[in-house]
């Protein structure tokens, strides 16, 4: 694992404002910086960055953290990769592969990729070379995709052994399987190989296309492993993410060749699901890189149905959805080869929004067919959680189909209100506010810790934060809290980012009042126990303690930092 001291050094040296400004502009506002949040759709900026605290926080979607958290969320990096990226910016030497949980699988995939790529360049890969020529694929223009060929004769196991890699590692990566005779069977044979990369650029799996169409299945993906889940990744996203951000648009195609054929012709903001219907997780991934999605699926019926399934998922992750229509007997790869890239670009630029696509595709010939069409669309709209987007799409549907808004609302299972639940204010408990204020003024912690002990806090997460402060003198909020403490984490970041102006003296008064309140609860419990037991001596003792405590509390200011409030 990466040494904690090295991580802390990287966080201390990273200028979080400079880091985030490389992705989108920040505007100075007082001592902090502000921008539209990159993690959710909004019109009024609620994303703040504090250079003093080295943190970011969005008051809208509640995402927050330090520089490492930002890279993990924005770039979709794992923790070691985010640390390594920051270290590289700072010129700090660090070896992150030691911290990779699945290092063995990553190494197996990398060696397999090298083997397949090598085979494609040799005589043994002639079938693969010829197939690519037939499909008009120029591998010189697609080097970032690291295409390869798996020979029908195999050879991966031997190559891996020469590289010091065991069969066990290949098996964990899903590259070989064991037959009943205990022989190792290579999963990919006589197939073109498409390495599948995660957002950090590591190979997590492979797709294989049979050279001979009689060889079934035509397309074969790696089996799922700890690093590879088909529904969690999109082919080409690693290579396309920068172009998507620049254009703020993603073009979604169906298959490997559709993507490669367009990519080599300069259309590079592309991604594709891995031979399955788009999933909710894949839709969410796309929304992190672009706010407009253009669906460019095959022109046949199955392609149109796939587009319709994708529309609902994409709308719900708050992106604008458009659809490019192709001739019924065509797909993006065939269209660009037969009609040229300029005509394809013109078709892409002429894409219609999903309402008009839906209406055009369905071609209702009777009133009843149009009713069915409209109800399908209403079902999609009804699943939108964001109230603003819900209202916008509702009014747009009303305009496109010339139906009053109220009529559409009344068809949503009898509902006349928005389908979302109203957002409730979050109440901050006094202990949560107190620990946040302590963290915000940790330079005075030597005085605070002379008053409080961990047992003075009843909220488990708060007690854990305070105990780590005592043990280490300083903490990283994300390191100290568990996944069960997500609500507390959001509240703490929110309070710290608000930067409420409080003096050390005022906070000390609040700490003393909290301590006295804890002591009073303890004494009241003792008084109750003494009464129950009939112990008059103990009862008198605790009553005197209680009176002394009440006199002490008279000299403490009441709620000097307003500990009980709402967000």
Image: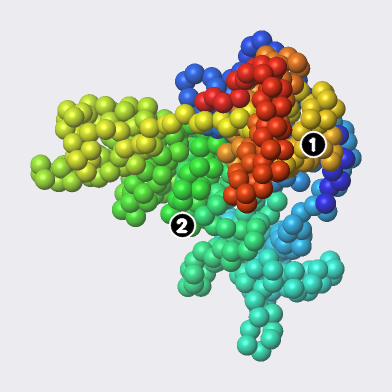
Residue of label 1 = 469
User: Which residue lies under the disc numbered 2?
Assistant: 276
Residue 383, position as x, y percentages in the image: 34, 42
Along the line of sight, the residue nearer the viewer: 292 or 126:
292
Q: Quadrant of residue 302?
A: bottom left
In front of the other: 410 or 188:
410
User: Residue at 42% of width from left, 31% of height from top?
Assistant: 423
Question: At 79% across and 36% down in the image, what residue appears?
Answer: 469
Residue at image position (72%, 69%) is: 170
479 to the left or right of 316: right
Q: Give x and y (percent) for residue 171.
A: 69, 72
Dot 2: few (<14), some (14–19), or many (≥20) neighbours within 10 Å?
few
Residue 429 to residue 47: above or below = below
Q: Is residue 501 above or below residue 109?
A: above
Q: Which mark sits nearer the N-terminus, 1 or 2?
A: 2
Q: How is the image coloured?
A: rainbow
Question: How many angstroms separate mark 1 from mark 2 (CA)?
Answer: 48 Å
Determine whether the residue tagged by mark 2 lies in a helix, strand or loop: loop
Q: What kind of element bears circle 1?
A: helix
Mark nearest the camera among 1 and 2 is 1
Say above or below: 498 vs 306: above
């Amino acid at each position: 694992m990466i040494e904690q001291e090295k991580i802390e050094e990287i966080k201390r040296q990273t200028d979080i404002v400079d880091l985030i400004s490389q992705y989108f502009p920040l505007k100075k506002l007082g001592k902090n910086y502000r921008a539209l949040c990159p993690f959710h759709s909004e019109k009024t900026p609620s994303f703040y960055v504090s250079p003093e605290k080295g943190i970011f926080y969005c008051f809208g979607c509640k995402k927050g953290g330090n520089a490492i958290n930002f890279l993990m969320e924005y770039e979709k990096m794992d923790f070691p990769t985010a640390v390594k990226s920051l270290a590289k910016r700072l010129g700090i030497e660090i070896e992150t592969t030691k911290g990779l949980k699945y290092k063995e699988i990553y190494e197996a995939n990398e060696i397999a990729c090298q083997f397949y790529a090598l085979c494609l360049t040799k005589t043994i890969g002639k079938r693969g070379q010829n197939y690519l020529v037939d499909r008009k694929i120029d591998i010189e223009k697609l080097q970032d995709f690291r295409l390869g060929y798996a020979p029908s004769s195999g050879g991966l196991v031997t190559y891996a052994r020469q590289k010091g890699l065991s069969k066990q590692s290949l098996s964990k990566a899903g590259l070989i399987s064991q037959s009943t005779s205990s022989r190792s069977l290579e999963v990919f044979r006589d197939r073109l190989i498409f390495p599948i990369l995660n957002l950090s650029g590591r190979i997590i799996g492979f797709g294989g296309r049979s050279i001979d169409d009689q060889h079934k299945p035509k397309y074969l993906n790696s089996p799922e492993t700890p690093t590879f889940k088909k529904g969690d990744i999109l082919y080409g996203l690693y290579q396309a993410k920068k172009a998507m951000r620049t254009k703020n648009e993603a073009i979604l195609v169906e298959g490997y060749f559709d993507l490669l054929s367009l990519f080599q012709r300069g259309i590079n903001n592309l991604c594709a699901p891995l031979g399955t219907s788009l999933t909710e997780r894949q839709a969410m991934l796309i929304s992190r890189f672009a706010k407009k999605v253009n669906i460019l699926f095959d022109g046949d019926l199955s392609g149109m149905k796939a587009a319709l399934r994708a529309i609902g998922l994409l709308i719900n992750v708050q992106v604008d959805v458009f659809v490019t229509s192709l001739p019924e007997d065509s797909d993006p790869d065939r269209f660009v080869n037969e009609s040229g890239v300029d005509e394809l670009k013109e078709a892409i630029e002429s894409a219609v929004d999903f309402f008009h696509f839906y209406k055009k595709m369905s071609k209702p010939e009777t009133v009843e067919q149009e009713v069915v069409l409209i109800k399908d669309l209403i079902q999609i709209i009804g699943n939108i959680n964001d109230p603003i987007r819900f209202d916008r799409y509702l009014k747009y549907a009303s305009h496109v189909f010339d139906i009053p808004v109220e009529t559409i609302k009344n068809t949503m299972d009898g509902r006349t209100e928005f389908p979302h639940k109203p957002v409730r204010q979050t109440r901050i408990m006094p202990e949560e506010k107190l620990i946040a204020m302590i963290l915000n003024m940790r330079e005075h912690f030597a005085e605070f810790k002379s008053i409080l002990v961990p047992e003075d806090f009843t909220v488990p997460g708060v007690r854990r934060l305070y105990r780590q402060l005592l043990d280490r003198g300083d903490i990283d909020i994300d390191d100290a809290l568990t996944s069960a403490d997500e609500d507390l984490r959001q509240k703490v970041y929110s309070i710290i980012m608000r930067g409420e102006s409080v003096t050390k003296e005022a906070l000390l008064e609040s700490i003393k009042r909290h301590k006295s309140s804890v002591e009073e609860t303890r004494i009241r419990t003792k008084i109750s126990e003494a009464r129950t037991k009939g112990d008059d001596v103990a009862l008198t003792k605790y009553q005197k303690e209680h009176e002394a405590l009440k006199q002490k509390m008279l000299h403490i200011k009441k709620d000097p930092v307003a500990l009980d409030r709402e967000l």
